[in-house]
Structures are given as structure tokens and as C-alpha cells.
Image (cartoon, rainbow, N blue to C red):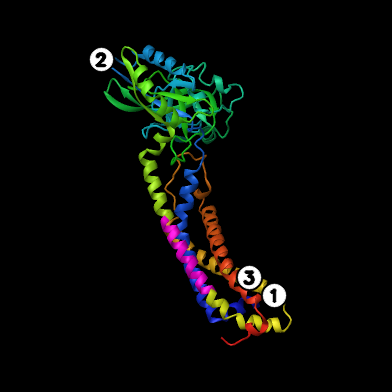
Amino acid sequence: MKQIKEIFRRSTSFWLALELILVTFTLWWAFDPVIVTNYVTHLPLGYDVDRMVKLDVYKTKGKTSFELLNEKERLLQKVLEMDEVELAYLAHTNPMGYNDVVMPGYFFNDKGDSISTQRYGFAPDSKMFDVYGIHSLTPEVPDSELTHDCEREKTVLLTRSLAMGLFGTIDVAGRKVLGQEYEWDEETQKSVWNKKPFHIRAVVDDVRYQTYDRNYATLFYCTSAIGYDAPIILRLREGVNAERFVQEHQKEILNEMWTEHCYIRGMQTASEAKDKQRWVITLKRMTRRNLLIAAFFATNMTFGVIGTLLMYMRQRREEAGVRRAFGATRWSIFLGFIREAWLLTTICVIIGCIIYFQFAAQKGLFDIFTSQNSAVRLWFDDFGTHFLVVSLFVYIIILCTVLLGTAIPAWRICRSTITEAIKEE
């Protein structure tokens, strides 16, 4: 307490403290969206996009997807004959990572609690999960058998978080789950919500269908539906670069991969498709904007605080000389300056965070990434944890700046001779 009073007795310390409090508030406002956005965008997708390629399959007019299923399967076999292709499957609905449109639905536990889901269809005995590299969490059902023994429109696979949100456990294979889907009613000639039971085949790892998505409530269901232009999804062999594969084989595939009524009209890597999504582009723009704002304030904070510290340390030059004259060592004086800087910074950051807390309690903290799954909770979902994490980040940035701005002039002062240090300036 005595040392704190001694620090704030100096007029320069008072103005430095006010500056540090203002800097704390400003950096909190600038870095909160940067930290949350970067954390969410760097969460793992749950599947590997580096060696994945989509082939857009089109058909001639007058033919349905069901009528052309055999021809599409022949195209799939042609693709699998390529040396650089390891696995491939014919998507029955919009594949993950390639389209903003997903099939929504609700699933219910035994108590009637619901979780909003995003659904992806797969055909029985398809290689979808092998291509994506999604792993089974049900020991009785290995990865290679996830799509075996699946009954169309009646079998589902849950992700870990969806199973935990509904049942509180992942040991749910073989159980029934009630689902609500938007379906066409022939009697009323309208789309209505219908509930029906599904058989749970297995539980798999969590996946995110988009970079920005933090709602892990993904569901895979066995379906007979085939999209109008269902694409073929490839997984290339280890060491094969997807971009190079597209460049080298695009002409060959577009010209030679065709049947009587089906043909391939385009190729796209999973990474390219992911980066072109509307929300991904918006999120990248927002992230760049937030980074620029944070960098601007951080740069101004650095120059402003260091400038004030240089002035503050020059005024302590004579004090250091007197202490040296009374027997104090260079290191004891240097460490004393560092200790005072740490103490002053800690107090000011705490005050600044308390002030920002009043603002955050009314306006809220940054969070545009909501989750519909109660089982999915990240650190920024809890107000207290969110506030402590960002406060610690801001504290570390300011502390490093202050210690650096203190250490350089303090070391120069301590290295000077006693007569130079106590010389009138």
C-alpha cells in the first residue's frame, strides 16, 4: 500500500495512469471481436478439405435423376480409375462445405426437448464418411460400415454433440429418436411439419459444415432422394495437391467423363468452394476490419504509452543517481522501476476493465456465433469466462508494452555514472 501511494504521489504517474485506463477500455472494445472471430474461424471442421474435389454432374433435359442413376454410377467408376483418386462417392443431397443451403429439422429427446439440426443425406453403402474422413464413435460400427444396414428415410447417424444434447451420452446406437421434418402433404397440397421416429445407426465425430458455423448439431440421414445435379465428391491420394489436380485434369475430365445423358461440366476444390461462400466472404471482411481497427489502436497505444514512459523515466533519473550514491545496486534500481511499472499497469488495467464491465453488462459482449445445441458451449458463451479471457489478453498486451517502455530507459539510467544521473537537467 505504501508503494502504491508513493507511485501515485508523482504527477506524471497520475497522467500515465489515466492514459492506461483509457487504453484498457479502448483495447477491450477493439480486441473483443478479433479474439472471438479468430477463435471460431480456426475451430476444426471435423473433416479434411485439403484433398477434396467436387465434380459438377449435369444431365440432359427430359430425364429424372433416378432414371440416370446408373449412368451417374458409371461416371463415378470412371473417376475412380484415375491414379490420383483414392475415394469418391455420388452425393445425394448438397454435400457439406459446398452450399449455404442445408435441410433444417428438429429432433426430440424422451423428455420432449428439441434441438435444431442441419441434415445431410447419404445413400446406403456409400463412401461418404470415408471420403470426408469422419470417424465413428460407436465401437460396434467401424468407419467402413457406417452406411451399411441403413434403411432409407428411417436411419440416422448423430454427431457427438447432438447425441449429448439429446440424451446426455453417445451410447445411443440402436435407439429411436423422434424427428420433425418439413414435408409435402398430398391432401392439403402444402408443406407441413411431420414427426416420425428414426433408428440411430451410430454416433460420429462433430463436424461443421462451414467455417463460420459453430452449431455442431449436424445429422446424417439415409435417403433415397437424389439432387437434380448431384455432384461427385473425390478424395485424392496422400501427397496429391487438389489445386494442381484440377489444373492438370480439368480438360481431360470435362472432355472424356460423360455418358449418353450425363456429363461433368465443372470442377472445384473444397478449399476454393469454402472460401467463396457468402458468409465466409462476409466473415473475412469483418475479421480484416476488426484487425485493422485493433492494429490502429494498438499502434497508437504503443507509441503513446512509450512516449509517456520516456518522459516519466527521465524525471526519475536524479532519483536513481541518489539511490546509487547511497549504495543501491544497478539491478535493484532497475528491478524497482520494473516492479513499479507492473504494479501501476495492473491497477490501471483492473480499473479500466471494471469500467468496461459496466458498459458490457448493458450492451453485451461480442457474439454473433450462436448455437442451437445446448450441449455446445464455448468459452465466450459464458459472460464471466468471456470477460476474464479478453481482460487477460488486454492485460498481457498492455503489460508487455509498459514493461518494454520502462525497461529500455531504466536500463540506460542504471548504467550511467552517479554524477551523470544526479546532474541537473
**How far separated are the C-alphas under marks 3 and 1?**
12 Å
Say which residue label 1 marks. Answer: 330
Residue 305 on the magenta segment: yes
Assign a secondary structure to mark 3.
helix
State the residue position of label 3: 338
Q: Position of residue 63 (x, y in %)?
A: 28, 14
Residue 117 lies in quadrant: top left
Question: Going by the image, does 211 lie left or right of 62?
Answer: right
The magenta segment = 292-309
Q: Earlier in the sequence, mark 3 or mark 2?
A: 2
The verdict on residue 406 being magenta is no
Amino acid found under the numbered disc labelled 1: Arg
Q: What quarter of the picture does the C terminus occupy?
A: bottom right
- Residue kind at label 3, given as amino acid type: Ile
The number of numbered badges drawn on the structure is 3
Q: Which residue does the numbered mark 2 point to in the structure image? A: 62
In the rendered structure, are the residues bearing label 1 and label 2 in contact, judged by CB atoms less than 8 Å apart?
no
Question: Residue 69, image x and y in percent?
Answer: 37, 14
Q: Residues within 10 Å of mark 2 (few under 14, many from 20)?
A: few
Amino acid on which disc 2 is placed:
Gly
Q: Nearer the viewer, mark 3 or mark 1?
A: 1
Q: Position of residue 343 (x, y in %)?
A: 61, 70
Front residue (pair 40, 353): 40
Of the image marks 3 and 1, the number of the one nearer the N terminus:
1
**Residue 3 visible in the displayed image:** yes
Distance Cα–Cα, label 1 vs label 2: 90 Å
